[in-house]
Image: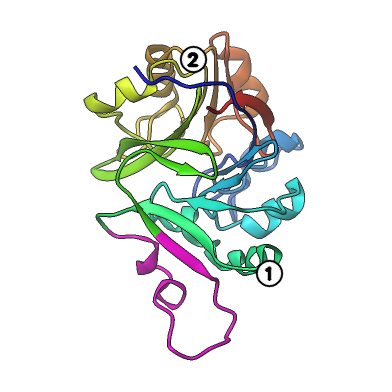
């Protein structure tokens, strides 16, 4: 079983929606037209801040600029990439502003094997020899196991997104798992002792590459966290009505949700 000390961090859910976001373009359903701000879901990402320590962004969503402005993201010491789908990496160009604020390049941690963000953004990851041109300054670092970000220990949790291997991340007693359809046998032990969990739950109906709500509830019950928030939620799940039907200790996340966790 993993062992951690006590180090507090604040987690901000920057985005809690799917690749389309909610409301979806051209949709007139009840959730897309909802007046409840909790039903407005930008693309999925979280921001982890350790008091007096590092600030870590998990995924650079398509909506990163708006998320950073809305939720006061000003410091960025590292970026962790769960996988290379567009809604998780297409905000990488916004790193340019953080390069200015930081005065240098930002480390980006990613899976060593399989297609990466470079396939979407070759101009950023394999830039031309010319200088200038507004390129984000990025230092790619492969993830092969647990690693450290300025004193914050991060444990990668292998997941399957359909048949695509992706990563979740554990920070102390908090774990962030998005876009999963399967938690492999070898990953359950990495989640022992998690007290706060964010886990994807797309909708009620089954989906080939994402947990449905019932599947996410079952996985959350097996992990046994005292608090679970569901993310990567589509327009099939109205925030208030869905929360009323969920088991105790479980709720849909929403953009701007903040809470404190034991991160080490």
Give the camera-side residue of 44 and 172. 172
Q: Does the rendering let one see residue 151?
A: yes
Give the camera-side residue of 133 and 202. 133
Residue matched to label 1: 100
Label 2, label 1: how many angstroms apart (C-alpha)?
Answer: 39 Å
Q: Secondary structure at mark 1?
A: helix
Give the camera-side residue of 64 and 240. 64
Q: Is residue 146 rendered magenta in the image?
A: no
Check the image and name the residue furthest to the top: 248
* Vertical comparison of 60 with 260: above or below: below
Within-10-Å neighbours for mark 1: few <14, some 14–19, many 20+: few
x, y percent for residue 197:
51, 24
Relative placement, left or right, of 156 versus 78 is: left
Label at residue 165? none
Q: Is residue 116 rendered magenta in the image?
A: yes
Residue matched to label 2: 225
Quarter holding the N terminus is top left
* Vertical comparison of 184 with 127: above or below: above
Q: Are marks 2 and 1 in contact (CB under 8 Å)?
A: no
Relative placement, left or right, of 22 versus 211 is: right
Relative placement, left or right, of 118 versus 98 is: left
What's the residue at 49%, 66% (across, down)? Answer: 138
Image quadrant in which you'd find residue 49: top right
x, y percent for residue 192:
38, 17
What's the residue at 54%, 54% (across, down)? Answer: 61
Q: Does the rendering let one see residue 232?
A: no
x, y percent for residue 185:
23, 24
Q: Secondary structure at mark 2?
A: loop
Q: Which residues are magenta?
A: 115-140
Q: Which comes before the other along the chain, label 2 or label 1?
A: 1
What's the residue at 53%, 88% (across, down)? Answer: 131
Within-10-Å neighbours for mark 2: few <14, some 14–19, many 20+: many
């Amino acid at each position: 079983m993993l062992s951690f000390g006590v180090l507090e961090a604040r987690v901000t859910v920057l985005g809690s929606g799917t690749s389309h976001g909610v409301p979806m373009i051209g949709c007139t359903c009840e959730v897309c037209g909802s007046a409840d701000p909790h039903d407005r879901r930008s693309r999925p990402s979280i921001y982890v801040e350790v008091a007096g320590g590092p600030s870590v962004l998990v995924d650079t969503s398509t909506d990163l600029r708006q998320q950073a402005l809305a939720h006061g993201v000003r410091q960025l010491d590292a970026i962790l990439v769960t996988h290379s789908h567009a809604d998780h990496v297409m905000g990488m160009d916004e790193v340019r502003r953080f390069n200015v604020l930081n005065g240098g390049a930002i480390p980006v941690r990613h899976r060593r094997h399989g297609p990466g963000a470079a396939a979407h953004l070759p101009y950023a990851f394999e830039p031309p020899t010319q200088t200038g041109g507004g390129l984000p300054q990025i230092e790619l670092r492969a993830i092969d196991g647990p690693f450290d970000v300025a004193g914050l220990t991060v444990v990668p949790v292998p997941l399957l997104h359909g048949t695509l291997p992706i990563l979740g991340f554990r920070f102390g007693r908090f774990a962030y798992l998005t876009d999963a359809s399967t938690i492999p046998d070898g990953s359950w032990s990495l989640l022992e002792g998690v007290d706060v969990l964010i886990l994807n739950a797309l909708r009620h109906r089954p989906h080939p590459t994402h947990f449905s709500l019932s599947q996410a509830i079952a996985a959350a019950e097996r992990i046994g966290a005292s608090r679970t928030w569901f993310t990567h939620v589509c327009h099939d799940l109205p925030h208030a009505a869905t929360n009323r039907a969920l088991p105790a200790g479980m709720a849909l996340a929403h953009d701007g949700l903040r809470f404190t966790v034991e991160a080490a």
